[in-house]
Image (cartoon, rainbow, N blue to C red):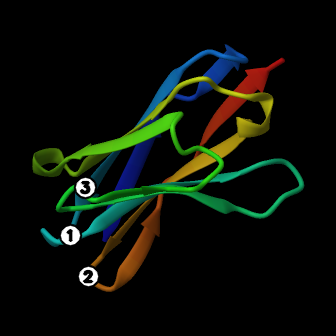
Amino acid sequence: QVQLVESGGGLVQAGGSLRLSCAASGSIVSRNDMGWYRQAPGKQREWVAGITSGGIAKYADSVKGRFTISRTNAKNTVFLQMNSLKPEDTGVYYCIISTGGNDYWGQGTQVTVSS
């Protein structure tokens, strides 16, 4: 089993920044992908960014240039630096790790951006 613990959400004004963290533990193979999804009220969960164990990062068009995903492989921890936040970035942010053919999700952390 794999456990994910997220932190770093909160309330911020538009234009501000937040940094999310997610630490994975348990049965994790060295080659894995980690990433972030988010879900706004009344909307479907959407992919935000992902990063491979080799450090290749990809972003949704809506966050490209504003968000940066990074990771520390030694600790299986992934980060999401969010800058120039907009009210439409509001939602619950979920961490995910794909390892050993399975996907595991964190419990989610709330991000609220006020206008």
Q: Earlier in the sequence, mark 2 or mark 1?
A: 1
Instruction: Say above or below: 3 vs 1.
Output: above
- Can residue 107 be seen in the rendering of this structure? no
Residue 100 disc label: 2
Which residue sits at x=51%, y=38%?
65
User: Could you tell whether 50 is left or right of 87 in the image?
Assistant: left
Which residue sits at x=25%, y=69%?
32
**How far across and how far down the image is residue 110, in percent?**
65, 35
Q: Which one is in front, 24 or 58?
A: 58
Discs 3/2, front: 2
Discs 2/1, front: 2
Provide the secondary structure element on which disc 3 rests. Answer: strand
- Kindly identify which residue carries mark 1: 27
**How far across and how far down the image is residue 73, in percent?**
15, 51
Q: Are marks 2 and 1 in contact (CB under 8 Å)?
A: yes
Which residue sits at x=53%, y=34%?
66
Going by the numbered disc 1, the residue's amino acid type is Ser
Q: Earlier in the sequence, mark 3 or mark 2?
A: 3
Q: Residue 56's quadrant in the figure?
A: bottom left
Q: Quadrant of the C terminus?
A: top right
User: Could you tell whether 36 is left or right of 31 in the image?
Assistant: right
**How far across and how far down the image is residue 28, in percent?**
20, 68
- Kindly identify which residue carries mark 3: 25
Provide the secondary structure element on which disc 1 rests. Answer: loop
